[in-house]
Each structure stands twice: as C-alpha cells, then as structure tokens.
Image (cartoon, rainbow, N blue to C red):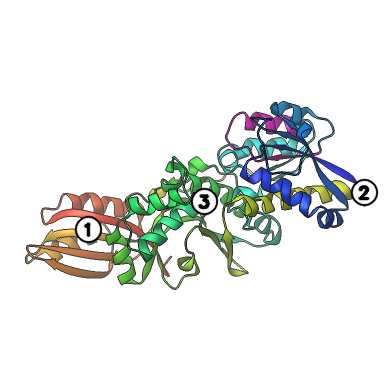
Amino acid sequence: MADSISIGMLGCGIVGSAVARILDAHSEEIGERVGARLEIRRVAVRNVGKERDVPLAKEVFTDDASDVVKDPDIQILIEVMGGIEPTRTLLLDAMRSGKHVVSANKELIGSLGRELFDEAQANRVEFNFEASVAGGVPIIRPLKESLAGERVERVMGILNGTTNYILTKMAEEAMEFDEALAQAERLGYAELDPTADIEGFDAAAKLSILASIAFNARVVAGDVYREGITRVTQADITNARSLGYVVKLLAIAESVDGEIAMRVHPAMILQTHPLASVRDNLNAIFVEGNQVGELMFYGRGAGGPPTAISVIGDAVDVARHIVSGGRGVGSIDSPPGRVRPMDSTVSQYYVLLEVADKPGVLARVAQTFADNDVSIKSMLQEGMGREARLILVTHNAVERNFQALLAELANLEVVDAIASSMRVQSAED
C-alpha cells in the first residue's frame, strides 16, 4: 500500500463527525480499495474546546479555516460546513493551491456552481459533490459516468425529506399542514426555520445541480421555477386520492426543444407511479433516458451517516486518481443552458371551484376553459345546498393559458372561489 493521503476538513458537525468515525472504522478496507490510507490531518471548527465523539486528536482541530486551506500537506479538502461565505472563498483558495475538493454544500453549488466548476477546471483539480443532492442516494456519479453515453430526457424526483414527511402525514393520517409540520419539527426532520424546505428552495438548489449534469449545461437554483407546499390542503389530498393520485413536492427537469425546463412545485402524481410510494422523509430520483428507459434511485436523503457515505465515496474516488496518476470525470465543461420560461411549460392541471348551484353554471365554466384553449379531461360535482364544488382535471395545456384561465374564472360571476389548483404529472406528460 502506498503512503497515506492527507485530508483536511471544514466543519465537524453531524456529517463531518460521521465522516471521521466511518473513515476510522473502515480505514483498512478503504485503504485497500484506494491503495493508500486516508487520514484526516486538519479540521476547522468554530469551537476547538467542544467535546466531540470523533477519533481525532485535539491538536488536529483549529478555529482558523485558512490554516486548513493553506496547509501544503493537505491533498483533499472535504467541506461540510455549509453556507455561501466564507465557504466560497475558502474552496476557491483551496483549488488555486492545487487541492482537490469534496463538498456536500447544495446551497453553494446550486447558486455559484459555475464559478467553482471553472476554478476546478482552470487548476486541473477535481471537484466532487455527490452528497449535495439526496444525501446517501448515489445519483451524481451515475449521471456523470454511468449514463455519460445516454441522452437523458427527464429527471424527476422527491428531493426534500421534510416536505415528503409532511405530505405523507397529511395523506395517511389526515393531518393538516401545520400539524404535520409541527410533528416534523419535533422529530428533527425540519429546521427551526423550515422556510428553505417548505417553500421549495432546498429542492430547487438540488434540482439545478442534477439538471446541470443530466443535460450537460450550467444552470443555477435561480433558474428553477419554485412553489412550496404551504397551500396544500386536506381537500387537495382527499381529492387527489379520489382521482387516483398522490400529492408530492416534485422537482422536474427536462429537455424540451433545446431548452431546459426546471420546476419545483406540489403536483398530483398517479398512485401507480414509483415516486408515489416514496414515504416519510425518504428521497427518490426518477431518470428517463432515450435508450435505458426509466431508472429510479431511492433512499435516505439526509442524516449524518448516509450523507457521510457519499462524502467518503467522493474522497475515495479522488484518492484513487491521486494514487494512479489519473484524473476523474471533469466538472461540467459546457456553456450556460437555455432555460425554458415557465409560462411555456406544458402540464395537466387540477382545479377546485366553488360555484353557484344553478342551471347554466357548468356551461359558463366549460366555455371559459375552451376560450383559453384548456381542455377538460374529467369533472366531478359535489352539491352543497345553494353552492356546488367542481373538481376538474385538464388535458395537457400550456402554463400561460392555464394562468389566464384562472384569472378569468376568478372574475366569473358564477364562480364564488377558486379553492385550489395544482399541476398534475400523469401519463400524458
């Protein structure tokens, strides 16, 4: 076995601690696979005096991250500290000093990935980020390497465990949104400020990373259309079930006429679709290719040990190339992608209307749909005395037409309220 490979680490929280413990416990097996021992030599933390359950000597720790970045003996830098700054500057400095970088930072990569990819390429170092999407679920490397010869047509997934847990509880235990969120917080599935999860920011950052790789084009989180789940109601969940669907927060990226369409939003998906059975805080990514057809990657999308396994996998990959003198698959070496405007996206839709229960109402509603070039696929009517509830599902329609339809329905005198609307992901798509 060759000499050891020195690793520096920025951060030693839940994920960083798990990385240290797993590297220590599996050191012999990992060393045999790499051809060299992987040894953590320096770790930057906020508080060097804090007690940590890690097999590292106290002198390894420093409260100055630049000490780790500037250390000439460090060959691989693992970043698990999160945030944008000073993380961005530290990683750029590490690359400029010839260090390979492994990161789990979805926020940074989703927002400023282009700059990091360019810097890694300019300095001929590797930049791996498997753990930035879906934690322990291997998806980055399969897209970059295993499917390198495939033309990926669509990537669709459940990329946020918190929202999936909430929607699972709403569907299976008839909880309202606020109750399900409170339970997620008690169990530690939701942050103290859950905004990034429930408003779709987290999923959008992850989707931009997947889309960049799947379609070999650089896009960022700001390019992704985003809606959260805060407006999903028990009525939506119940109506979805009666129509044969399940409500999920879907992250969808697809190639359409040379453009990349990307969106994160609640959607009804057929109960027979593999993603419909993904429960609780699990993640799944569904990939559709021109030749391979349909593939699904499924597992735990968060947590210390699962995420640490992805981090270590990236580090092992880099270490093998250091030992062999080779180089891994490069970062995304392509121009910015052409992003398809959301109003050009095509989808099916669900609409819940409260209307006056009198003759002629259905005709007025149907005509409004037709006037906006939106075709009704199915309709259910529920009487409520002087009012009625209409549950409608459309055929495929263009987003701008559907939004124009909603505006007209809101002003139609026979419509008391648009109680809800949602996109539908079905066999027509």
- What separation in Å lies between label 1 and label 2 (alpha carbons)? 73 Å
Residue topped by disc 3: 259
Where is residue 180, by image quadrant? bottom left
Disc 3 element: strand
| Residue wearing tag 2 | 2
Percent position of residue 378, x then y: 27, 70
Give the residues in magenta.
75-95
Sequence-earlier tag: 3 or 2: 2
Element carrying mark 2: strand
Nearest the viewer among 372 and 226 is 226
Q: Nearer the viewer, residue 204 or 428?
A: 204
Amino acid type of the residue that numbered disc 3 sits on in the rendered structure: Glu
Report helix, strand or loop for mark 1: helix
Q: Residue drawn 16% across and 49% down?
A: 411
**Distance in Å between CA atoms under marks 1 and 3:** 28 Å
Q: Residue 371, labelled with which disc?
A: 1
Q: Which is in the foreground here, disc 1 or disc 2?
A: 2
> Are the residues flagged by discs 1 and 3 in contact, CB closer than 8 Å?
no
In this view, 316 is above or below 393:
above
